Image: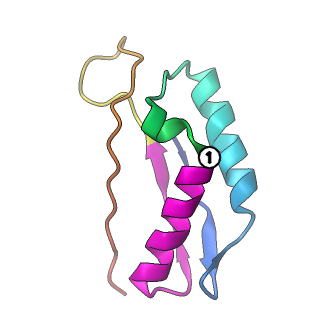
Amino acid sequence: MTYDVPSVRDGRFFRLDDHLTRRESSCAKMRFKLPPSLRSRAKLKRTLIKMVARSGIRDAFVQIMITRGLVGIRERVAQGKFLSRRAEQ
């Protein structure tokens, strides 16, 4: 499993590109073979920004987590699933 938690202040991510670079590095170190839906930095960035904007939450922490799932500990191919959940204040 790898995860990163960028912060959002006044509706804007703080140093999101740094967090995405760290995510890519962590996935490479874990030897994750990401599906195309999770490989595109630009698409993930757009999705995260849109998600925060739609939530209406101005100050938050957004957890980005990637796991191998439930398929067994030696499986290295990630399934392309995107889940989002809003925490109520």
Residue 40 appears at what percent x and percent y? 57, 42
Whether the magenta-drawn stretch holds residue 75 is answered as no
Q: Residue at x 62, y 62 (%)?
A: 6
Along the horizontal axis of the image, is 11 left or right of 18? left
Q: Quadrant of residue 76?
A: top left
Along the horizontal axis of the image, is 79 left or right of 29? left
Q: Is residue 32 visible?
A: yes
Q: Is residue 39 above or below residue 31?
A: below
Residue 49 appears at what percent x and percent y? 55, 69
Decide: few, some or many residues near mark 1? Use Cα within 10 Å; few <14, some 14-19, many ≥20: some
Is 46 or 31 nearer to us in this picture? 46
Whether the magenta-drawn stretch holds residue 45 is answered as yes
Residue 58 appears at what percent x and percent y? 54, 87
Question: Which quadrant holds the C terminus?
Answer: bottom left
Along the horizontal axis of the image, is 20 left or right of 27? right
Q: Residue at x 71, y 70 (%)?
A: 14
Residue at the disc numbered 1: 41
Q: Residue at x 75, y 64 (%)?
A: 15
Q: Is residue 1 visible?
A: no
The kind of residue tagged 1 is: Arg
Q: Which residues are magenta?
A: 42-65
Q: Is residue 55 above or below residue 61?
A: below
Q: Quadrant of residue 79?
A: top left
Is 35 or 61 nearer to us in this picture? 35
Residue 38 appears at what percent x and percent y? 48, 39
Is 65 or 46 nearer to us in this picture? 46
Q: Is residue 3 above or below residue 33?
A: below
Is 88 or 57 nearer to us in this picture? 57
Secondary structure found at label 1: helix
